[in-house]
Image: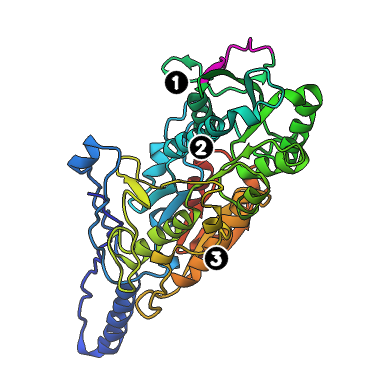
């Protein structure tokens, strides 16, 4: 069972003095009573235990005990015991991908909110493969029997970027396995097909066999260290197209920010289908102009979950209120359709959807709250609380243009006063330096620059 933070108040009885000191005694009792109503005592929260289903399955509905109905002011709760949600960037080792379970178990009200990276990666790869199979005779631009693609990699140390690179390569048959995992390293240039980190794939369409080759790929990183960089991607496709443009039949990208930079810089004019990820509004609209497709990571569900788990912890209710079970306003999600929950990882994952020419009109505005969870909470029962939330990079297209606008709509629905902090995408200190007084906040939502750096934030809360 996953149990949210539970605090019990302990109050020592005040000794009754003589009749001459009755006035003083009454004052002490009154003061003690006020202290009790404001905060809990020092008893430790009950430790969480895994459910039997969590041990057998990667997904499991979380359940939680209800906490005391008394709501404690921010200044009266230890910072280390305040609700914390990591979002978008899961605490993990950027080299091995191993999850940072210490960060995910920082306290009993700590969770991660993201999306199912593997499911989304497989979906993106399938979307590209399906497109090739339907249009192979049209997209083999030079008729050489080789479907050549280039790939923009966001961050070689980011789990989502790794998964998306692997998803594309696995679907197109260009993946190379090493030590039980698909190699996700950038290939550099590979026009001759001799690279070792990828291999040539093969697709048969209408009785004709085509080779599939990853012509080039690189991490889109600035000299200053910022990753997922759209201008860098735009420059890269310019360089690639100048060298072997007639061989490029498909452009693939780990996200829409880089995908759209390449689409606008080269592939739109040359009618080369481009595929991204995130379903940003500009990318979805561009499908009408030849953008091949994108993946919606259900940002509307992610943004809701990011703030909802904090709201529930602050209210002292079951963690799944308004998630798998309806709240009093009627907000509720469908587990297995809208999201999944992994109890062992303490993580909520939104499920992904493919956005193509067949359905893109349904996704044109990515900043609309998800209708099943767009009902206003009662401020009398869910009073305003203050949340510190950071975005790792103010220039990140998905977080800035889609995720934050959704958060700003949900914070009002959930009666949360959120202070939004924008980072520079390069250093944690640019963000952590602005968390100088954590005591003034009731809860925290953290989006790290690097997934290895959770301790840079939790150290400030201890």
Residue found at the far left of this picture: 52
From the top left corner, tell me how far across and down residue 227 is, in percent. 65, 37
Q: Earlier in the sequence, mark 1 or mark 3?
A: 1
Residue 435 visible, this orientation: no
Asked if residue 418 is among those painted magenta in the image, a careful observer would answer no
5, above or below 330, in the image: above
Q: Earlier in the sequence, mark 2 or mark 3?
A: 2
**In 3D space, how far apart are the residues under numbered discs 1 and 3 (Cα atoms)?**
39 Å
In this rendering, the label closer to the viewer, 2 or 1: 2
Count of numbered circles in the view: 3
- Residue drawn at x 68%, y 21% as measured from the top left: 143
- Residue drawn at x 47%, y 16% as measured from the top left: 177
Residue that numbered label 3 is attached to:
408
Q: Which residues are magenta?
A: 192-203
The answer to which of 450 and 355 lies nearer the viewer is 355
Residue 229 visible, this orientation: yes
Q: Residues within 10 Å of mark 1 (few under 14, many from 20)?
A: few
Residue that numbered label 2 is attached to:
127
From the top left corner, tell me how far across and down residue 282 is, in percent. 65, 53
**In 3D space, how far apart are the residues under numbered discs 2 and 1 (Cα atoms)?**
22 Å
Asked which quadrant contains residue 142, the reply is top right
Label 3: element kind:
helix
Residue that numbered label 1 is attached to:
181
- Residue drawn at x 59%, y 28% as measured from the top left: 136
The answer to which of 29 and 54 lies nearer the viewer is 54
The answer to which of 325 and 204 lies nearer the viewer is 204
From the top left corner, tell me how far across and down residue 85 is, in percent. 44, 52
406, above or below 291, in the image: below
Secondary structure that dominates the magenta span: loop
Label 2: element kind:
helix
Tell me if label 2 and label 3 are in contact, CB under 8 Å. no
Q: Earlier in the sequence, mark 2 or mark 1?
A: 2
């Amino acid at each position: 069972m996953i149990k949210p933070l539970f605090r019990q108040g302990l109050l020592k009885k005040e000794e009754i003095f003589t009749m001459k000191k009755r006035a003083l005694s009454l004052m002490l009792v009154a003061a003690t009573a006020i202290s009790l109503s404001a905060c809990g005592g020092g008893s430790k929260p009950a430790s969480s235990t895994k459910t039997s289903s969590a041990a057998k399955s990667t997904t499991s509905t979380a359940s939680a005990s209800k906490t005391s109905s008394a709501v404690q002011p921010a200044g009266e709760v230890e910072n280390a015991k305040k609700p914390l949600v990591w979002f978008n960037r899961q605490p993990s080792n950027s080299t091995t991908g191993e999850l940072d379970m210490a960060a995910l178990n920082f306290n009993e009200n700590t969770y991660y909110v993201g999306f199912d990276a593997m499911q989304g990666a497989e979906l993106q790869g399938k979307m590209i493969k399906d497109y090739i199979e339907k249009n192979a005779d049209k997209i083999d631009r030079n008729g050489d029997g080789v479907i050549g693609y280039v790939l923009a990699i966001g961050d070689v140390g980011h789990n989502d970027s790794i998964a998306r690179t692997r998803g594309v390569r696995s679907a197109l048959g260009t993946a190379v396995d090493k030590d039980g995992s698909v190699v996700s390293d950038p290939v550099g240039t590979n026009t001759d097909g001799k690279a070792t980190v990828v291999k040539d794939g093969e697709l048969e369409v209408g009785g004709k066999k085509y080779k599939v080759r990853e012509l080039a790929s690189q991490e889109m990183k600035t000299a200053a260290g910022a990753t997922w960089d759209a201008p860098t991607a735009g420059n890269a496709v310019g360089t690639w197209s100048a060298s072997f443009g007639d061989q490029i039949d498909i452009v693939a990208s780990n996200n829409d920010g880089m995908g759209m930079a390449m689409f606008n810089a080269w592939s739109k004019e040359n009618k080369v289908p481009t595929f991204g990820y995130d379903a940003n509004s500009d990318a979805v609209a561009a499908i009408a102009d030849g953008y091949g497709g994108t993946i919606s990571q259900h940002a509307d569900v992610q943004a809701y979950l990011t703030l909802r788990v904090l709201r529930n912890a602050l209210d002292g209710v079951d963690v799944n209120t308004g998630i798998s079970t309806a709240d009093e306003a009627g907000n509720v999600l469908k587990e297995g359709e809208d999201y999944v929950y992994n109890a062992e990882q303490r993580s909520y994952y939104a499920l992904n959807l493919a956005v193509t020419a067949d359905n893109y009109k349904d996704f044109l505005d990515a900043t609309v709250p998800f209708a099943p969870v767009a009902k206003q909470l009662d401020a009398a029962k869910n009073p305003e609380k203050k949340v510190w939330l950071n975005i790792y990079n103010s220039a990140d297209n998905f977080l800035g243009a889609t995720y934050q606008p959704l958060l700003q709509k949900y914070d009002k629905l959930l009666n949360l006063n959120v202070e939004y902090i924008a980072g520079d995408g390069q250093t944690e200190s640019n963000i952590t330096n602005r968390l100088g007084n954590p005591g003034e906040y009731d809860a925290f939502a953290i989006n790290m620059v690097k997934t290895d750096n959770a301790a840079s934030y939790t150290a400030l809360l201890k």
